[in-house]
Structure formats: C-alpha cells, structure tokens
Amino acid sequence: MKPLQNYLDGKFQEAREGGTREYLNPLDNSVLGVATESKQEDADAAIAAARKAFDEGPWPWTPAVERAAKLFKLADLIDSNAEEFARRETLNNGKPLREAKYDAADAAACFRYYAGLATKPHGQTYEVGDPNVLAQSVREPIGVCGQIIPWNYPLLMASWKLAPGLAAGNCCILKPSELTPWSAQLLFELIDEVGFPPGAAQLLYGAGDPAGMALAASDWVDKIAFTGGTATGRKIMQAAVGNLKRVTLELGGKSPVIVFADVDPDVALEHAMWAIFAGQGEVCNAGSRLFLERSIAEEFLSRLAVASGNVVVGDGMNEDTEMGPLITRAHQKKVLDLIESGKQEGAELLCGGSAYTDARASGNFVQPTVFANAPAHARIVREEIFGPVLVAEVFDTEDEAVARANDTIYGLAGAVFTKDGARAQRVIRRMRAGITWINTFHLTFAEAPWGGYKQSGFGRELGTYGYESYTEVKQINTHLNPQRIGWFKNLS
Ligand code: NDP
C-alpha cells in the first residue's frame, strides 16, 4: 500500500526512517490506508526548509496580490474537488457526508476570505508630538509557523490554519492528526498544483509526539498554532517556552445552551439536539450542557428523550444518516466510561447510554445520550466528554442560569434561546465564553473571530483577528527633516 507522503520543501516524500501508520474507517475499523510516520529528523528537515523559505524568501516578500492569487486558485481547486474531500472526511472521520460537504465548502470560503484580506490595509499612521516625525505601524509575518490540528475537522482545521498563515506571508508546517491524515494529502496535491515556493507550505505526518512536539519545542519555529485537547495544549505551551514562541491554543469546552420558556419549542428542541449531536458531539464547541427553564422542562425533556432516540445513527455515507461513529475504539470506550460514571454518580439516564449490539457493533458508535438530574460535582457535568452525551439541568431564574452556565473551567462557546431580545443580550454578555449564539447554534463564518475564554485557550482564529495572530506589529518612525540631535558636542 503506497503511503500518504509528507510534502517537504516542495516535494512529496516518505519519512526518513520509512515507518508507516494505518488510518482507519471508524464505521467498521477497517484499514483505509497508511501514512508515512515522521520522526524528529523529518520535523527538522521541514523546519530547515521553512526557515530557508522565510529567511531567504521569496514567500514573505511575495507581493500580497500574488499571495492572494495563489490562495484564490487554491480555493477554486478545493471547490472543484469538494466531493472527494467530503468522501475522504466521512470515510476517515465518520461524520455524515452532509456535514463533510459543508466542511469542504467552508474550507474553500476560508482560503477565499484570507486571499481577500491579504491585500487590504493592515497598518496605521499616528499623529505624534513631533511634526517632523511620521509614525507608522506595519504588520509583518511572524516567520515559521507550526500548525497542529485534530481529527474532528481535518480539512477545515487545516484551512483555518494555513489560509491566514500563508496570506500573511508565513511559512507553515501542518501536522495533521495521525488518525485522519487522508484529506490533507489531497489538499497538498492542490497546493503543489497551485505552485507555492518550496518551504512555504509543508505537510508533516506523524504522531503528536514526536512530530508535533518537535515543532512545538524547536527554537527555529516562531509560532505554534494548536487545536486539540486541553491537556495537550498545556504540553504545547510548556514546550514553546524555550524560545518564547507565539502560541495560540483552541482547546476543549463544556458549552451551555440556555432555553427560556418563551421559545418556540420545536426550534429550541432541534437546536439543542443539533448543538450536541452534530459531528457526533466530537466538536470543541458542542452544546453539551442544556439549561431549561422549569416551566417547560418536563415536557421538553420527554420530547428530547424521544427525539434523541430517533436520531438516525449509521454509515455517514448514507444521505439520511444524522450521526456517525466516534473516531476510535479507544475514544468510544472513553465516552462509554464517562456515561457509566454518570450512572454511578446518580444522574438520571433519559435515553441512550450504550454502544450498539446490532451491525453497528463493528464500528465505534455510541447512542445519542441524554442525562438529567446529575449532581453538580458529577464528571459528566464537569468534564468534556467529546461525544454525543447531553446533560440537562433545570433553572428558575436568569441569574441562576448564568451562574451555573459559567460554573466550568471552560469558556469556549454558549447559546441562549428566548424571544426576549433584551434578555438574550443580557445573558450573552454575562456568559464567559468567546463564541456565542442567540436563537441558533454552531454557525461559524470565516469572517468572524473564533476562540475561547478561560481554559478553552487563547488567541483567535478566523476574521481579521485570525490574520493578526499570524503577524507581528512593527513601529516605523521616519524623520521628515533629518538633522543633528546636538547631544554629543564632539563628533570628530
Ligand atoms: P489531542 O489534543 O491529543 O490531539 C490534537 C492534535 O495534537 C493531534 O494532531 C495530535 O497528534 C497532536 N498531539 C498530541 N499529543 C501531542 C504532543 N505531545 N505534542 C504535540 N502535538 C500533540 O487530542 P486527542 O485526540 O488525544 O483527544 C483528546 C481529547 O481532546 C478529546 O477527548 C477531546 O476532549 C479533546 N479534543 C478537542 C478538540 C478540539 O477541537 N478542541 C479536538 C480533538 C480533541 P496525533 O493525533 O497524531 O497524536
């Protein structure tokens, strides 16, 4: 089986030690293929090529309009390969094809957005105290950027990292998850077709440690952008300390959805389910805690239990599938163990709670699961589960809903459902989270910033903030009438 190859210094190539790692279909754990397995030496080669491309050019000095042209072309190529991207994502990740198609469209939109942004004004000029001085700031690329991405949105996360990084003139090394390497190969085939300078955009396969860690720890890497688990984020941050590299972290969450009694119940019910079951709940911003106002709670929960039991769970390649399998057996076990802990700690299981015993047993499926009446200290209330497990709670007042929604170490996302516009704004402004929605969920746009408060990370991706996170700010002071200072009398 020909392995997926690294793309280093403008060439597809296998890792120097020649090892490979299988990647699987979570539908039945069959082998889809193998990817080359990079070690320290390969990471070093990638870093050296990126260093050369950055320090000697031409990428950082390529005019913005030319960088933009390449990114626009890449966006068009992603569009024309969208079906193949979606197929690979579904087979390798398990998510329904319908979702994977959105990911492909969003990836193209992300490259297009940052292509456009590259040519827009980025600096400022300042009125300063001395009329003879013109003070300006310009934005410049940071340098070599290591980009480590997870397995839940392989193509989209690659796009969120590469598009702003390249648009701003950085030289980027992408390290996909070893679990989902397939779509990155196609993306880099298209990058090769567009024709970026060698070393500007590179693909490094391999395990988190050593391949990802080599990027995080290298003194020759200027920035590390990471999306993944909070525990790994801590390790990345520690490794990055050596050369004080720039770090952006997009980590886990335990995001609240607050539903007031005045809502259209069908709208709120479907969104509550979409918030947790989209992407099998393997979504950093998943709405995994549902807060219901007491007067509607009983009716809402009984409908939620029935509707969750009716979710079509199966092969993502089937057009009518609403939820697919989890990424690995190990992750399925982690989710099932957390469900078990919920039962042991006294939560009431309203639906789901198990794997399947039918034909789906060969895959990593977990039933859509809803708990209620969990004690506040229960692990299912406090920990990120990263699976289709919803914990519902009941509240009496707005203050109580906000306080309990904020009672978490995380602060990635949150939502409120109410017809009262003033209340919606009040609740969202008090919610300690970086991504919020009013009367909707999950909507994400390349144009708007994405990132978390508290232990959900720091820094922002997407929008102008995402571009800025790939730049340094340089101050330039120009004297318009150069003359002697007069401090040193004797210059001879
Ligand atoms: P990780 O955080 O371990 O993986 C994310 C990325 O980091 C992958 O590319 C991984 O590589 C890489 N990585 C892993 N260890 C290191 C390391 N020591 N140094 C550098 N890079 C590393 O996520 P897991 O897959 O282990 O999932 C664990 C939990 O994290 C999940 O259960 C979930 O709670 C959370 N998570 C959150 C995500 C989010 O979007 N915020 C996404 C994924 C997970 P490789 O996979 O090749 O080992």
Image (cartoon, rainbow, N blue to C red):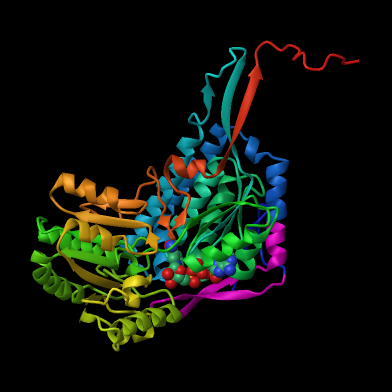
Nearer to the camera, 122 or 233: 233
Q: Residue at x 62, y 74 (%)?
A: 20
| Quarter where residue 282 is shown | bottom left
* Above or below, comparing residue 51 to residue 209 in the picture: above
Q: Residue at x 41, y 54 (%)?
A: 452
Residue 59 rendering spot, x and y as whole percentages: 64, 40
| Quarter where residue 334 is shown | bottom left
Nearer to the camera, 492 or 259: 492
Residue 157 rendering spot, x and y as whole percentages: 46, 56
Residue 401 rendering spot, x and y as whole percentages: 22, 60
Nearer to the camera, 486 or 92: 486
Q: Tell me the quadrant of the picture where the C terminus can be found.
A: top right
Magenta residues?
A: 17-46
Q: Is residue 284 visible?
A: no
Q: Is residue 361 visible?
A: yes
Residue placed farthest to the bottom in the image? 357
Residue placed farthest to the right in the image? 492
* Above or below, comparing residue 430 to residue 44 in the picture: above
| Quarter where residue 406 is shown | bottom left
Q: Is residue 190 magenta?
A: no
* Above or below, comparing residue 279 to residue 188 in the picture: below
Residue 225 rendering spot, x and y as whole percentages: 54, 54
Query: In the rendered view, does 317 fall on the left or right side of 74?
Result: left
Number of numbered tags placed on the structure image: 0
Q: Is residue 29 magenta?
A: yes
Query: In the rendered view, does 90 fall on the left or right side of 144?
Result: left
Q: Tell me the quadrant of the picture where the N terminus can be found.
A: bottom right
